[in-house]
């Protein structure tokens, strides 16, 4: 078991490195330079100034050397310095990580927490009104674009009713306030309900077709009792895997949500860095979010193994 | 072991709860004390540094101009006014300026402001690591800066331009504080900047706000408001919503949002206005790499084919003005006798035929020597729908006179790259002007690496550009500008299609808002002159 985990972690680390190499390469291929200003005034940089700056930031080095020096610093736990504001990338990520983490953790919690009862209700009587309506409702939600939903929610709850804050994290520390998180979490949650609740339903129905369950029915147990006693246990394994895979998807979604609600998280940082071609920040955020995604998958694997003895021993 | 999965789930659950537990941080420092007169405005991005001169952009400028004074500053009409310098004099030789500094001006920590501070600031500003792009380029020709006494500064140039004073809008830093930092960009000073301006620094929360308070001892008089909160909103929609909830008191927005605000139930709470900007939406015609636009008749024909008046009325909510040249029509520099080209498709067709472009095969597209009149229009991608509408409108209008246009829309950085390589036929873009010196746009010496992307090469235009740049007598200079505009209008190397107005909206009780072409906060007055109407409780 431990060996499996170790191997998974090693391949994960390798994947991460490849991802950063890919990001580094893609930024180089993209037109534009981090030294270009975003304004369109009429004061171009003189070539002497440009050369001085390229030397200052190390852009005069060959690309291979630039990437290698980034790796070298990484090995010492240094993610480099942002080109935009020249602050350590690690500091920039550290001050924004709590927002993204709490946003995603809450969204994951609510997606799973809501999808399981919805899926179970649907699985209780496949083809029933509850089944069909829950499918329709969750698919409708799935079809609503986030930026539009966010705008409507802002209008209703923040502007018209004034119940919830409109934007920002509300605190002076990195960790956001609960009220500030309500709308962003709703936006990040609703789209996942359709997929996960259908997944839960399918797995429950499948598991209730197994022989143990058939015999349970033969013993005279009610459908509900069967679902609770056997169905969930059997369906738990694939559901855990799914939760692990949800993490990367949520992270991608939080880029949009953070920007709309002006939540100072990693997603917003990433967007800004992309516009400014701030290579060290882009690499840093890729590394951290990639690590989170891989950790999610690893977590799914391990819990899978813990939940299913066949995998554990195998 | 049977219990394991459940235990595991329980653990996950606990972790999740822990992650979402509310944080009881220190009390929100953004909340103003009762009775304080607070105004909240916004910028779109965290400044790269609060060093006031490091890597400055419009956002940093808005903060800097509040915290500290420059030697001179624009007023609302973009006329240079004295600030730290009470007077200045151009030398007879025409190569130096002598500034007399105001006495009795003090930094926020009580130390006096002297000429040594000016010397320190300009030294720092010109270091490449400061990456100043706002003022440093204009100081390249500055040869020597001396301080004969505590309140005199003499600037000697290798070449002095008529607009030389503009660069002296650079904010002045206290040498005794900022000079202590090894690294000005992110040092102690940039964390707690000190100036001699009308507002003092209170705090800065990244991604959220920069808060300033009135300087009771400001030499020009204390501001009427007590506190200025500069919020950071990168998303315009969210900023607009914040305006509706009162979290923001003033903002410039797109014409669409402005229209929406006017029709909203909150409309009566706001002053809805607009101001004229010196920003032109332009078309640059590449005269070198194609058989079309080397001929001024073809360039003029393209302009005559565009019904700009109806576009303004029907699409731009009436919030734009037609330009005759890149000299803003609302500015004091505009030549009154240079009228924009009107809408005259027949004349356009006639000009194209005269230039040899005829549709002989009847396919709707003109040709000459077997070459079809088919070209590309390079446009930057914008969040503003208007950019797309303009490109479509041009494509249709030009099709009507027998030209086939392909629109190439590129992300901003990619767009810049293509433009820099001169790899386009027609390029559309916005230009902001703060002065009438348009040398870099049109001078033949700027063809290779400057902003003359269109390879404009006209000796007469070169001569007039030089005259505008180096004529110091205001009347004579204006006459040269007018001559330049006449020539530009004939040649049409760049078409200033529209000068868009900036839709401005602010809380009705806020008084003293006087926008300039640069915005509502980038001039000598701005928030310093704002005040709340009696009994207003923001």
Image (spheres, rainbow, N blue to C red):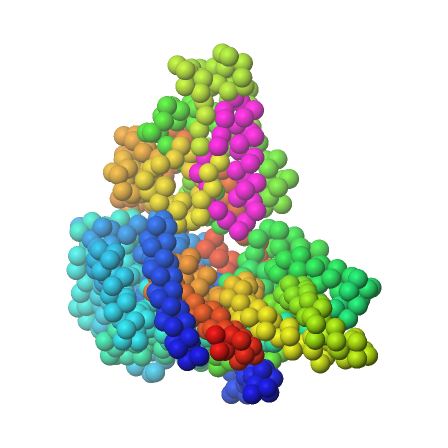
Does the magenta portion include B496?
Answer: no
Q: Image point 73% across, 62% down: which residue?
A: A135
In the displayed structure, B291 sits above or below B441; it is above
Residue B366 image position (x, y, % from top left):
48, 18
Q: Image point 53% across, 22% down: which residue?
A: B401
Residue A291 image position (x, y, % from top left):
42, 71
Q: Image point 27% across, 42% down: which residue?
A: B449
**B129 sits left or right of A278 in the view:** left
Does the magenta portion include B388?
Answer: yes
- Residue that protrudes farthest toward the top in the picture: B360
Query: In the rendered picture of this protein, how many numbered marks are placed on residues?
Result: 0
**A273 sits left or right of A125 in the view:** left
Question: Of A287 and A53, which appears nearest the observer?
Answer: A287
Residue B347 image position (x, y, % from top left):
52, 20
Question: Of A201 and A80, which appears nearest the observer?
Answer: A201
In the displayed structure, B488 sits above or below A139; it is above
**Residue stretch in magenta:** B377-406
Q: Please indicate, yes or no, whether residue B285 appears anywhere in the rendered image.
A: no
Quarter containing the C terminus of chain B: bottom right
**B442 sits left or right of A290 in the view:** left
Q: Image point 17% across, 57% down: which residue?
A: B143
Question: Of A146 and A135, which appears nearest the observer?
Answer: A135
Quarter containing the N terminus of chain B: bottom right
Q: Please indicate, yes or no, whether residue A83 appears anywhere in the rendered image.
A: yes
Which quarter of the figure has residue A214? bottom right
Residue A228 image position (x, y, % from top left):
72, 79
In the displayed structure, B385 sits above or below B247; it is above
Question: Of B69 and A31, which appears nearest the observer?
Answer: A31
**B121 sits left or right of B211 in the view:** left
């Amino acid at each position: 078991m431990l060996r499996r985990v170790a191997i998974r972690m090693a391949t994960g680390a390798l994947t991460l490195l490849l991802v950063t190499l890919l990001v580094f390469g893609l930024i180089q291929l993209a037109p534009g330079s981090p030294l270009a200003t975003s304004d369109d005034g009429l004061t171009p940089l003189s070539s002497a100034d440009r050369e001085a700056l390229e030397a200052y930031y190390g852009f005069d080095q060959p690309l291979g050397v630039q990437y290698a020096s980034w790796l070298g610093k990484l090995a010492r736990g240094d993610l480099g310095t942002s080109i935009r504001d020249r602050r350590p990338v690690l500091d920039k990520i550290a001050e924004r990580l709590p927002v993204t983490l709490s946003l995603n953790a809450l969204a994951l919690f609510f997606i799973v927490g809501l999808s399981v009862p919805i899926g179970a209700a649907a699985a209780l009587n496949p083809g029933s009104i509850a089944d069909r309506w829950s499918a329709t409702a969750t698919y409708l939600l799935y079809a609503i674009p986030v930026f539009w939903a966010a705008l409507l929610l802002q209008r209703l709850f923040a502007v018209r009713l004034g119940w919830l804050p409109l934007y920002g994290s509300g605190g002076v520390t990195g960790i956001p306030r609960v009220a500030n998180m309500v709308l962003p979490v709703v936006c990040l949650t609703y789209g996942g309900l359709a997929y996960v609740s259908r997944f839960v339903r399918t797995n429950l129905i499948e598991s209730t077709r197994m022989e143990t369950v058939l015999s349970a029915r033969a013993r005279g147990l009610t459908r509900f009792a069967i679902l609770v006693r056997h169905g969930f246990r059997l369906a738990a394994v694939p559901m855990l895997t799914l939760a692990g895979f949800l993490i990367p998807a949520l992270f991608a979604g939080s880029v949009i949500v953070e920007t709309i609600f002006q939540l100072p998280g990693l997603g917003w940082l990433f967007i800004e860095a992309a516009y400014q071609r701030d290579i060290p920040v882009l690499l840093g955020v890729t590394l951290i979010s990639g690590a989170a995604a891989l950790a999610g998958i690893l977590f799914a694997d391990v819990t899978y193994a813990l939940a299913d003895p066949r995998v554990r021993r195998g | 072991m049977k219990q394991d999965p459940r235990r595991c789930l329980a653990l996950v659950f606990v972790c999740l709860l822990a992650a979402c537990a509310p944080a009881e941080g220190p009390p929100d420092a953004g909340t103003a004390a009762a009775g304080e007169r607070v105004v909240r405005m916004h910028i779109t991005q965290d400044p790269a540094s609060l060093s006031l001169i490091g890597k400055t952009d419009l956002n940093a400028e808005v903060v800097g101009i509040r915290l500290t004074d420059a030697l001179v500053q624009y007023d609302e009409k973009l006329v240079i006014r004295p600030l730290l310098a009470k007077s200045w004099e151009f030398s007879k030789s025409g190569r130096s300026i002598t500034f007399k500094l105001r006495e009795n001006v003090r930094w926020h920590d009580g130390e006096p402001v002297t000429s040594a501070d000016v010397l320190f600031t300009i030294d720092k500003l010109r270091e490449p690591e400061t990456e100043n792009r706002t003022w440093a380029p204009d100081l390249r020709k500055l040869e020597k800066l001396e301080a004969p006494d505590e309140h005199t500064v003499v600037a000697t140039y290798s070449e002095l331009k008529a607009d030389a004073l503009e660069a002296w809008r650079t904010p002045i830093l206290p040498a005794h504080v900022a000079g202590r930092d090894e690294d000005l960009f992110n040092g102690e000073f940039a964390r707690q900047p000190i100036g001699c301006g009308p507002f003092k620094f209170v705090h800065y929360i990244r991604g959220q706000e920069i808060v300033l308070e009135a300087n009771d001892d400001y030499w020009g008089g204390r501001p009427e408001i007590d506190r200025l909160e500069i919020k950071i909103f990168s998303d315009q929609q969210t900023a607009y919503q914040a305006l509706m909830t009162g979290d923001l008191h003033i903002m410039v927005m797109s014409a669409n949002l402005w229209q929406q605000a006017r029709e909203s139930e909150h409309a009566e709470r706001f002053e809805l206005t607009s101001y004229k900007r010196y920003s032109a939406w332009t078309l640059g015609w590449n005269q070198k790499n194609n058989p079309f636009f080397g001929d001024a008749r073809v360039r003029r024909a393209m302009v005559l084919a565009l019904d700009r008046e109806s576009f303004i009325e029907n699409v731009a909510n009436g919030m734009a003005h037609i330009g005759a040249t890149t000299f803003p029509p609302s500015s004091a520099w505009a030549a009154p006798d240079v009228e924009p080209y009107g809408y005259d498709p027949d004349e356009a067709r006639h000009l194209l035929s005269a230039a040899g472009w005829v549709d002989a095969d009847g396919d709707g597209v003109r040709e000459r020597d077997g070459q079809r009149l088919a070209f590309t229009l390079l446009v930057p991608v914008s969040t503003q729908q208007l950019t797309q509408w303009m490109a479509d409108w041009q494509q249709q209008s030009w099709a009507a006179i027998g030209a086939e246009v392909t629109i190439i829309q590129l992300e901003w950085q990619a767009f810049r790259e293509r433009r820099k390589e001169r790899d386009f036929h027609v390029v559309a873009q916005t230009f902001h002007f703060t002065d009438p010196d348009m040398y870099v746009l049109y001078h033949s010496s700027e063809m290779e690496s400057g902003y003359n992307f269109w390879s404009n090469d006209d000796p007469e235009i070169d001569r007039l550009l030089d005259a505008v740049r180096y004529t110091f007598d205001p009347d004579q200079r204006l006459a040269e500008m007018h001559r330049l505009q006449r020539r530009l209008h004939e040649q049409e190397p760049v078409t200033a299609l529209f000068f868009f107005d900036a839709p401005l909206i602010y809380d009705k009780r806020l008084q003293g808002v006087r926008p300039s072409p640069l915005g509502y906060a980038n001039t000598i007055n701005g928030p310093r002159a704002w005040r709340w109407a009696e009994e207003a409780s923001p």
